[in-house]
Amino acid sequence: MEHSVISVVVPAYNEEKTIGEVLSKTMQVMENFGNPYEIIVVDDGSTDKTREAASSYKVTVLSNGTNKGKGYALRKGFKHARGQIIVTLDADGSHDPKEIPKLIEPLYNGADITAGSRFLGNGKNSTTKLNKLGNKIINAIIMTLTGRYVTDSQTGFRAIKREVLERLNLNSERYEIETELTVKGLKNGFRYVEVPIDCKKRRYHYSKLRLIVDSAKILETILRAKFTK
């Protein structure tokens, strides 16, 4: 397992100003880590130069053609990934690629899924009060239905064993993909570990999360994941 190929999947939508820095830092971290690796960028129908910016690096760039959602983009990246370990990383610069090894290490010690939590430890956390509240509510619902408590069910920074990911049977299209990963990971008995991470404030644009619509989809995903095989 220590010499596993690692795939880093980066979904991106209109992130031309940050994608280059994210990829550059990720490549440097993975080179130092020492394992064979690949980086897959999935351009989710960007209308700016995200795809062109990503293509200037030694990474695989896939395109959805039109904007189909983060979940769709991640699932496409997973299908093309060849690694035994798959890392998910946001393209907006909010995650620090230097923390990738911290996510991977627990998988070498029995964990199946490692989730980076913005609410553990004393790291930097720029999450808005509204998103913190929403996250707490979702966490409480998940605990009620699964009997397991997590501090950050909505994190986009994770490391997952490939064989585990294949058994989760993911089908989310948008931001509810994070909830689906969490609930299915917990309810199916996989060893789910959280580690503290820093979270920086977006420097450009605004979050693509649609509060009312995506919150409803998240709730629907929790219930569907809990009560279906």
Image (cartoon, rainbow, N blue to C red):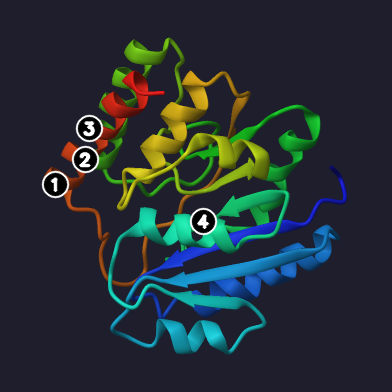
- Marks 3 and 4 sit apart, C-alpha to C-alpha, by 27 Å
Which mark is drawn over residue 95? 4
Which mark is drawn over residue 217? 2
Residue 116 in the image: x percent, y percent? 54, 40
Residue 57 in the image: x percent, y percent? 62, 84
Residue 11 in the image: x percent, y percent? 45, 64
Of mark 3 and mark 4, the one earlier in the sequence is 4
Image point 73% across, 49% down: which residue? 84
Q: Which residue is mark 1?
A: 213
Of mark 1 and mark 3, the one earlier in the sequence is 1
**Image quarter of residue 145:** top left
Q: Residues within 10 Å of mark 3 (few under 14, many from 20)?
A: some
Q: Which residue is mark 3?
A: 220
Q: Secondary structure at mark 4?
A: loop
- Residue type at mark 4: give it: His
The answer to whether residue 154 is seen in the rendering is no
Q: Are marks 2 and 3 in contact (CB under 8 Å)?
A: yes
